[in-house]
Structures are given as C-alpha cells and as structure tokens.
Image: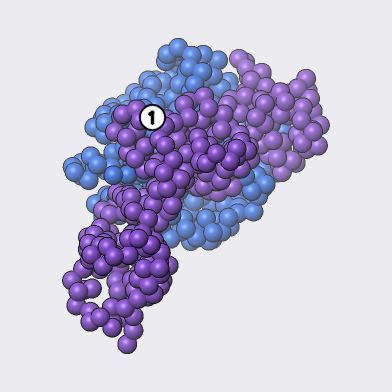
Amino acid sequence: MPNLDALQRWMQSVIMNPHGVHTGVESDESRRLIDVGTAEVEDVVTRSQNLSAMERLDIYHRAYFARLVECLRDEFPVTLHALGDEAFEAFALEYLQKYPSRSYTLNLLGAHFPQFLAETRPPDEGDGPNWPDFLIDLATLELLFGEVFDGPGVEGQQLLGVEQLQALDPEQWLASRLVPVPCLRLLTLRFPVNKYYRAVRKGTEPTFPQPAATYLAVTRREYVVRHYAFPRLQHFLLSALVSGQTVGDALEMTADAAGPQLSRLPGLLHKWFRNWTAEGFFLRVEVPA
Amino acid sequence: MKPSRLGHPNLGLGVGLRTAHFGYLLRNFPAVDWFEVISENFMDSGGRPRHVLEQIAERYPVVMHGVSLSIGSTDPLNFDYLSRLKRLADTVNARWVSDHLCWTGVASLNAHDLLPIPLNEETLAHVVKRIRTVQDYLERPLVLENPSSYVTFADSTMPEWEFLSRMAEEADCGLLLDVNNVYVSSVNHDFDPVEYVKSVPHRRVVQFHLAGHTDCGTHRIDTHDNHVIDPVWELYRLAHQCTGGAATLLEWDARIPEFPVVHAEVLKAKQYMGAALTTPAPKVQLRASDATALPHPLSYVVPEVA
C-alpha cells in the first residue's frame, strides 16, 4: 500500500497530466510513485456503482484544467477577446503546464502569463512589432490592472495638491522630490492596447491596432483602476520623478531628451504638474531642510 | 463535556460574501444575520475587497472560510499563509476560522481544488497533528468542513463520518457540516447520508453549509450554482434536529443571482428547523446531465477598471 505522500504525488501527477488520466496513470512519473497501470488502478482508487476509478479520477482532471482556465479568462478578458476562445484556451492550457500555481491565492495564477506569451512567441521576423507583441502588451496591461486593483492604495489619504507645489520657492522646488502613490505604475508598450482594452470593455469590436509606442500610467482612485496615455516627453519626466530624481535633475534630463520640443517645454510643465496632482499621482513633496 | 458548538454562538442564517453583491450590500446593508468570507480573497487585499470587508465587519458578524490551508497535504504547513490568516482573523474579528478536510496540492503545487484523502489511521494521525499545530499557531480552534468528493481510496479503512468524529475529538477542533456535501458524496460513493449526519459528533458542529449542486446522471458535482434541492433540505432538518441548531450559511458561487434571491434561499432554512423528520430520498434527478459542471469554490476576484 502506498504511503500518504506517494498517494498524493501520484494523484496530482495523474490529474494534472494534460493528456488525460489514462496517460497520467501510465506516465513514468506516476508509475515511479505507484506502479499501477490503468488495468490495476482500482487497487488504488475504488469504483462506485456508476463510475469506474478512471472515470472518477477524470472528474478531478477536467476540473483542474477547466477551473483554472476559467480563472485566467476572468483575469485576461480582453486578451481572451483578442485571441478568441479556442486560441486562448490553448495558450492557457500550455501556460498551466509550464507555470502551475505554487501559491495559496488565485490572484497570482496569471502572474507569469505575459512572460509565457513572450517566451513562446514565434521568432521575430524583423519587421517591427506584430500580433504576438500586441498580445504580450495586452496581457501585460491586464495583469497590471489586477495588481493595482488589489494592491496597496491611498484611499482616504490626503494627497499632494498643486497649491503645495506652488508654495515652494524656486530653489526648494528644484531640490525637492515627489513621492508617488504606491499604486502608481508606469509602462511603455509597443501598441495602444489601452485604447483596445477600453473599446472591448465598452462592447465594441475594435480592429487590431497599428503599432505605436504607447506611454501609460496606471493608478487607482476610490478603489477603481484608472489608466492614462501620455506623450513620450511627459511620460519621460514622470518616470524620472517616480524613480526618485529631484525635480531639478528630472527637468534637466527631460530638457536633454526634448529635442525639437524643448522650446515648448516650459509652457507644458505647468499643465503636466497640475494634471498629475489632480489625478492623485503623488502622495507628498519632500523638500530638503 | 465540551459545550455545544465549542461554545460558539449560533449566528443564525448567513450568506457567503461575494464580489457580485458588493454594490448591493454597500447601498442597502440588508438585514442578514452574518457573512462568511473566502479568506484567500481578502488576506492580501489592499483594495476594494478589503475595504468592503471592513465595512461589512463593522456591521455584521463575520466568519472566515479558507480553501488553501491544505490540512491533509504532506507538504509542510505554510506559516506565511497562516500568519496572514491570523492577521485577517484579528482584523475583522472573525467569529471562527474554517477550512476543509482535504489537500489542495503537494510538491509545492496548488491544484486549487479540495482533493480527497484516504480515510485510514495514517492519514488521521497526520491530520490531527497538523490541526493541533495550526490551532496552536492561530490560538483558536479550527473548524473543518467535509468536502464533496468524487473518488475514494482502496486504502481507506473507515467511513468519512468516523474519520471526522475521531479527528474532531483527537484534535479538539470544530466541524463545519456541509449538508450538501454529505448528500453529493453519498450519491458519488454509495453511502447513506442519514447515517452520516446521525453519526458525526453533534456537539462539535459549529456551522452548517448549504448549496446547490449539479446532477450529472452518474454522479453529482458540487457546483454551488443553484437552489438547494429538497433531499438536502431534509438532511438539514435532520442535522438541525441532531445538533440543536448551528450557524447556517448558503454558498452560491456560480451563475450568482441578485442578493435577495441568495438571501431568500438561506431563509428557507427556517422551514426545516424542528419539524418532523423525513428521510431523504437518495437519488432525486435534479436536471439533465451537465458535462461542463465545475466544482466550486473558485476565488478569483475580478478587478474594476474605469
């Protein structure tokens, strides 16, 4: 008789086998644990009046894949929309084999899904971002939405207001650092998947978008995830501030990166800082003594 | 002698807190006796689920029900998980903490399913030892539920009710008697659900679960997606009579209707308290076979995005 540990490892090996319980029972892994074939499996699992041992094991096998694919559908609804049911399910099943859950929480089930899509994408043909890159970007965005939705937030807290910035003298302003809210995430993508996401969620049928460098901020206010697209330069400055640069250093780096937009930059800055504070991107300003 | 329900109160008729009902609950704060929450949905939450739970816990008694303790697994206990569980229980003043007599994975994997154990002396000793460890860590008695199951093992040497009884006595823990699970397993494993309900240690039953399930013709699956069927209500009547009553909770996890429908379902339990006993018919056809039926609970929380 197998001990409890061998029995559990055997059952797990059988029900998690992607090719079904017959292949699972006959697999080398399972037979190393408990050496029974399908003909002798009732030495381990008993039959009922209505079902054989293999049919009963199959209930767990089907449930394992079906329930976790269902969770991935919930976690990546727009990626599912883009791929279609059949293709999404194929990716999801392969993903569950490569990255089976190792956590007590289903919230982490899809944590490696964008990475998996990147690892399994067809070879790049060198003609710029294409369909696989779009899917990877879309899954990246959906994963981030989930993290921001249930991660730490600042609801109920006083956030940085533009008037606090206006109260600083120029020297203090340039030496200061802006502390971002913990739910703020910045990312750069190859496709405007944010627009695609919004269109699908509104129930429309957007076409596959053309590639376009997309600079996003994702945050949460009043427990709802918000996302914003910015021009490259605005995103550049925001990224520098969020990374902990002083305002002075961040502005200098941005000026260096501005190119032909340099002359317009002073006029834009006031609007940018006003918008960022209005959207609650920063918790406070730290001014050196 | 142990006090009934390990000294816990009979909280009345409660409902499982589900995200589909968050909006309704916060707008109406309906007159519900208590709520049960899936522990894993809230223990790491810094967002809306946790915010809603805190508001619920301010107004209603809350009980925590887990799906990932994996008390029957041969993997080591996860003390990081237990520390989060304990912290949440303290924060929301959980009246008690429950999970399932099952294992959810081994070799560091999690199948996110409530997998059955062989019912024998080796498993009993293993489970009892782990329950004691968990109880010492949580500094409170654990309450364990009988899961629905779909296989039994050749190595089993005792019926599930006997295993539960000995486990509860030896580990000094409570029981969450899921009456629907008793019924589902009784059909799947060809045993008498009445004998089961009559045989568990009634003073240790802290809570009941009720739920709907799916009739697949050759077996039943615990889908939590429908009304409670009459034979399960009759088992509940028996369980209520045997125990003198305990906190009763309705689970509805798929195809979830509006909150008032779910609440009305659990309120039906009042009709089965103390009336004449009827022995349930063991195999009533609920509906046609459903090959897509999935056991629940699942516990993924869908984010809200503007």
Q: Find residue A234 and report its horizontal and vertical position in percent.
A: 33, 59
- The purple-tinted chain is A
* Residue A167 visible in the shown view: yes
The residue sitting at 48% across, 25% down in the picture is A85
Q: Quadrant of residue B268?
A: top left
Instruction: Look at the picture and state if B200 lies above or below B44.
Output: above
- Residue B216 point in image, percent of width and height: 50, 17
Q: Quadrant of residue B261?
A: top left
**Total number of numbered discs in the rendering:** 1
- Residue B179 rendering spot, x and y as whole percentages: 44, 31
Q: Amino acid at mark 1?
A: Thr
Which residue is under mark 1? A207
Q: What residue is shown at x 77% (from left), y 36% (from top)?
A: A29
Q: Secondary structure at mark 1?
A: loop
Give A6 or A173, whichever is nearer the viewer. Answer: A173
For the N terminus of chain A, give its image quadrant.
top right
Rendering coords of residue B257 (x, y %): 30, 29
Taking the image as shown, residue B132 lies to the left or right of residue A190, namely right
Decide: is B190 above or below A9: above
User: Which residue is more in the foreground, B132 or A204?
Assistant: A204
Chain ID, mark 1: A
Position of the C terminus of chain A, as image quadrant, is: bottom left
Chain painted blue: B
Residue placed most toward the observer, B136 or A183 = A183
Whether residue B179 is visible? no
Residue at point 55% right, 49% down? A103
Q: Residue at x 50, y 60 (%)?
A: B83
Q: Is residue A230 above or below residue B282?
A: below
Q: In the rendered image of this protein, does residue A268 appear above or below residue B147?
A: below
